[in-house]
Amino acid sequence: MSTQDPYVRFEICEQTRIGTLWLDGAGGVNKIDHAFGQALLDRVGELAEIEGLAGVVVASAHRDWCVGADLDYLYRERDHERLLGVVLALTRAYRALETLGVPVVAALTGSALGGGFELALACHHRVALDSGRVKLGLPEVSLGVIPGAGGTQRLPRLIGFQAALELISQGRVLPAPVAQAKGLVDALEPTAEAVMEAAKAWIVAHPGHKAAWDRRGFTWPAPAPDSQDARNLFMAGSAMLYKKTAGAYPAAEAAFTAAQEGARLDFDRALELEARLFVKLAASDGAKDMIRTFFFHKNAADKLEGLPHSEQPDFVKVAVLGAGMMGAGLAWICARAGYQVVLKDIAQPALDRGMAHIGKQAAKLARKQGPEQADAVLARIRPALELEALRGADLVIEAVFEDIGLKHRVIREVEPLMAPDGVFASNTSALPITDLAAGSGRPAQFVGLHFFSPVEVMPLLEVIEGRDTSSATVGRCLAFGQRIRKTPIVVGDGFGFYTTRVFTAYVLEGAQLVAEGHDPAIIEWAARVAGMAVPPLQVFDEITLVLGKHVVAGSKPYLGDRLALPGADLVARMVDELGRTGRAGGAGFYDYTDGRRVGLWPGLADLADGPPTETGVQYLAYRLLAVQAAEAARVLDEGILKRARDAELGAVLGLGFAPPSGGPLAWMDRQGLVALVGRLDYLAGSCGDRYAPAPILVDMAARGERFFPVG
């Protein structure tokens, strides 16, 4: 016997009386929209009427088990009461399944995320496919919301407060084997068929089973709510969370509130508390902006929507010039993606250091996937000092020092050895690609591929089109970026392109604020309060003040004196007179002991011009975001930025621009462009022309426009 539904259907085995509740969403994807909860509740009601029902297996008719909320719906919906009704209906459906009176098992043959994993938590037992492709977890915080269908209540009752909140507040998603080790699933099986059989066997062995929290005498995993240990845990956890987020991530804080307050309530009331906290966040501008950037924009970029494609074959042999940290990292990720790689340098010690770095990456891979996998990647990397090793390369990525003369010499040396249709890419962070391509004999096959450090971790790839770069070249590089698992943005040419211009505005503004006499500790804290991933003086030390000084000097032929600020003079003085070059040099804006940051350098106060006329955390936080947003708008106005999504992805994924804001354009929308233009005009008058609103902002404000429509 079976019952059909657009979302879920069930069938009953007449011999065993075990029902299988199939998740069978349209389009081959199981996701939770406004009607899913009622459909599930209807099916559970029908199951409850079946005489002699022994138990229920919840399974998927598709590759994934359930990918969570329908984000199209969640992004559009802003009505609090309507959204609350949808969430409570889902909560009731999960609760009805959980209290059906028979054992219920989740047969996780595919990934279960967000609301999908919350459905699995509402089952009494979870059996998963033993595969790294099966991902499980509650990533909602990364989209500006919290789990809304029981995740903040069931997971702490299952594995304890500390373990649950670490996963929820970080939005972590785990492969099934790791999830099993952490207690999120109960058993692993090698095949989908074995998962189903194990689920049914568990039902037979556990008649009348109930969720632990529905059984009399339920005992929480230590520490128990309202115990001194639990109070200490929440006090310490809240303090650590605030130290990490500076209050800029409301979803993470709401997750703590839901877990702590819900533990004191009847279970059903706790679910309602969680639902209301979820709705408050989900209906907010912050969540909408994060969903747009981290889901819609990122998915579109990863799928190369609206970007050039090429009919030419993929690259086979990749050569990386320069064996520094960036070059070695590039060699590793290319080899890991299956390319044959040559890592070229002119000095054996540099090559040795590069290969040592690669060896550390191989050791990490060996621990995760076994030595055979690591050895296979290493076998695809050839270190070389001689130019001849580059012969036949169809992609060359140069990562040598930022000197246009040096780069031109390298281009002329290497191009004759490349495959006839090969692409030469520069990893320059600032020099215009058109100027670099002047040293090339085939500028149509010359492109900028700007990676971010550490390249093994950072997800962004900025693809820069020179004046003569062909669409086919861009298409081939985008396919390459997809294969090495980078999210691309494609921008036009000019000094600093997009990301370097915005990043330079940020770190130089940090130095400028020091020069103006603002307390460096307050500058750093204000950046954190604004939501920036890393404060400006800290990140300036990481990239080195020498590089910052070099970028300022290199900008003059292109930008004139735009970067000639007291902050830039302060940086030059720190480098030239005081030898404070940054973390690598053991001293910068911060002091260091054995490479470890130990505190801001007290001598910064002596470099300041005097006390500022206006200061404070909120004032500084606004300036640090506004100066970046003003530069992003200027780059957009100049036509270097071509897509709004690239502005958001480039700033957030590449630079750590306030992830809770969704990006600089979303941040400007939220300020209101009329108010923003007025504030920028004020700052331009009091602080300098770098704040002056770009013509595009003035025009949009006059027309009452936004970068992104509401809803």
Image (spheres, rainbow, N blue to C red):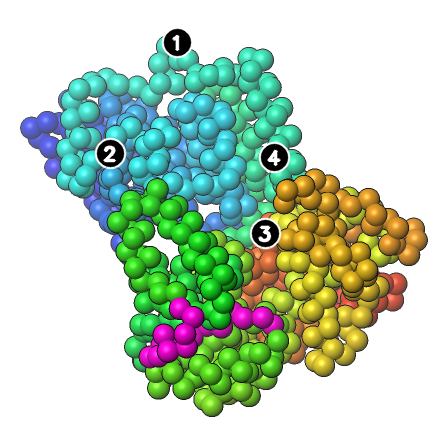
The first of marks 2 and 1 along the sequence is 2
Q: Position of residue 134 (x, y in %)?
A: 30, 44
Is 652 on the left-hand or right-hand side of 589? left
Q: Name the residue under label 1.
A: 217
**Circle 3 — which element?**
helix
The boundaries of the magenta stretch are 384-402
Image position of 649 with respect to 51: above or below: below
Q: Is residue 269 left or right of residue 98?
A: right
Amino acid tagged 1: Gly
Q: Are marks 1 and 3 in contact (CB under 8 Å)?
A: no
Amino acid marked by disc 3? Pro
Type of amino acid under label 4:
Leu
Q: Which residue is drawn at 30% across and 77% down?
A: 313
Residue density around tag 3, few if under 14, some if 14–19, many if 20 or more, within 10 Å: many
Residue 386 within the magenta-colored segment of the rendering: yes
- Residue 42 shows up from this direction: yes
Q: In this figure, which residue is indicated by the disc labeled 3?
A: 659
